[in-house]
């Protein structure tokens, strides 16, 4: 398990690789407002939640993770709390 310090946001944020924008992830977002991220495999759910909440200023309701055996990353699905602001990303290519 990776341990982070509170003031170490730059080291945490590089472990969040990117927001996955595929047709499947766009459909999940459109139907259920679920975001899909690719993160470093070493992160666990509490660390992912803490990092995403600090980087994007959001409130996460639920995280589901999926290890990808071929690569050294995880695919995660997050849903936000109702009082959280939405992420400012563009998925308009898939609508």
Image: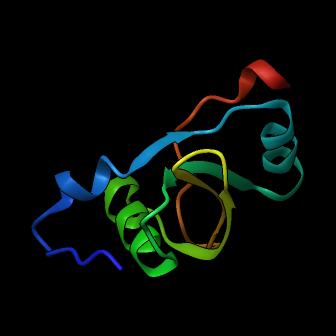
Q: Is residue 50 above or below residue 67?
A: below
Residue drawn at (65%, 46%) of the image: 70
Residue 37 % position (x, y): 59, 49
- Relative placement, left or right, of 43 versus 32 is left
Residue 78 % position (x, y): 64, 64
Q: Quadrant of the C terminus?
A: top right
Question: Which coloring applies here?
Answer: rainbow
Q: Quadrant of the N terminus?
A: bottom left
In depth, the one of 14 and 2 nearer the eye is 2
How many badges with numbers are in the image? 0
Q: Quadrant of residue 51?
A: bottom left
Residue drawn at (62%, 29%) of the image: 90
Residue 54 % position (x, y): 32, 63
Residue 16 % position (x, y): 42, 50
Residue drawn at (67%, 54%) of the image: 69
Residue at the top extreme of this rendering: 93
- Relative placement, left or right, of 61 versus 28 is left
- Relative placement, left or right, of 45 versus 5 is right
Residue drawn at (86%, 39%) of the image: 24
Residue at the left extreme of this rendering: 7
Residue at the front extreme of this rendering: 70
Q: Is residue 54 above or below residue 36?
A: below
């Amino acid at each position: 398990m990776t341990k982070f310090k509170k003031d170490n946001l730059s080291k945490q944020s590089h472990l969040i690789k990117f927001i996955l924008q595929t047709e499947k992830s766009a459909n999940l977002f459109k139907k259920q407002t679920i975001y899909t991220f690719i993160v470093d495999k070493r992160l666990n759910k509490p660390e992912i939640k803490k990092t995403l909440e600090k980087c994007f200023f959001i409130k996460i309701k639920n995280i589901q993770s999926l290890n990808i055996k071929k690569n050294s990353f995880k695919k995660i699905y997050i849903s936000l709390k109702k009082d959280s602001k939405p992420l400012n990303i563009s998925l308009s290519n898939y609508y």
